[in-house]
Image (spheres, rainbow, N blue to C red):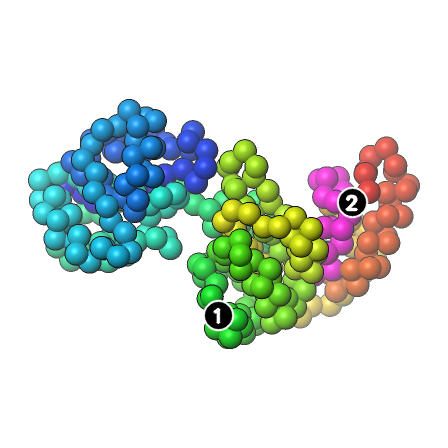
Amino acid sequence: MGTLYLVATPIGNLEDLSPRAQRLLRQAALIAAEDTRHTLKLLNHFNIHNRLVSYHEHNKLSRLDEILSALQTGDVALVSDAGTPALNDPGYELVQAALQAGFPVSPVPGPSAPVAALIASGLPTDAFLYLGYLPRKAADRQRLLAEVSGLPYTLVFLETPHRLLDARADLQQVLGDRPAAVARELTKLYEEIFRGTLSQARLHFTAQPPKGEFTLVIGGRAAETETWDADRLEAAIRAALAAGTPASQAAAALAHQSGWPRREIYQRIIAIQKEEPASHEPG
């Protein structure tokens, strides 16, 4: 009896394919891939030449019997085009079928665009809600956002370049002008992570038309807390500047946390920067 391995593959940088993932791909009796042409390039790069079959959204049910049959005699590796399989990619039905048939299912952790964007966002990571791709239609998108607008968790979404600006507008309209990170081309040569508010994201991506697949990380609803006193705010400002955070981004994030107006925080940041011009560059 074989094992179904869920093998994470690079989202950009090929060095992110782990030694364990390479070994299991070489040992697998069968590799089920979302796009065999895409996966073949990855396998050829690592000189892996195992049997390869397609497993994608349109044939995922018709392929089940073939893959379960292969598991009777050997291991099967499931991969998606990039990142972790079964996470916004085909795989859920296969995992269920394999478990129901009594086969072991084992994850081979590795790259994941939502997690990569989250940990680099600068937003809280202790509790987050991942919701995959935002709905295509504005009404459906706004309805979903309204359902999660009161949650305190950091929100993580995927979005395509041609819908990014419309999605951003709905995010700001429904959720308010929250702190956000917009990541694209993660681990690739032109990796970009924009950090700021949703309104600042509009200016940025209007000036620089969006390209590539995007991961959106949005701050959760701020808890109703007392406004920070001036000493606490100044300490947080100095800590942000010491960490190299640009003034505009620091002002946006601290406004969300402290209860102070962003404009006033920004003015205080500039004043502190003028005190120590050699230490901090204006944001």
| Cα distance between the residues tagged 2 and 1 | 36 Å
Along the polypeptide, which appears first: circle 2 or circle 1? 1
Q: Quadrant of residue 2?
A: top left
The overriding secondary structure of the stretch rendered in magenta is: helix
Q: Residue at x 74, y 60 (%)?
A: 255
Q: Is residue 6 visible?
A: no
Q: Is residue 51 visible?
A: yes
Residue 91: x percent and y percent? 28, 53
Task: Between residue 35 and residue 72, name the one nearer to us.
Answer: 35
Q: Residue at x 54, y 33 (%)?
A: 189
**What kind of residue is marked 2?**
Gly
Residue 68: x percent and y percent? 13, 49
Q: Which residue is mark 2?
A: 283
Left or right relative to 223: residue 35 = left
Comparing marks 2 and 1, which lies closer to the viewer? 1
Q: Write the start and end of the magenta stretch as one range.
A: 241-257
Task: Between residue 105 and residue 22, name the one nearer to us.
Answer: 22
For label 1, count other residues whose C-alpha is less than 10 Å away and answer few (under 14), some (14-19) or many (20+).
few
Task: Between residue 74 and residue 153, name the one nearer to us.
Answer: 74
The image shows residue 17, relative to residue 251, as above or below, that is: above
Image quadrant containing the N terminus? top left
Q: Secondary structure at mark 2?
A: loop
Q: Which residue is mark 1?
A: 137
Residue 72: x percent and y percent? 9, 44
Q: Residue at x 59, y 42 (%)?
A: 192
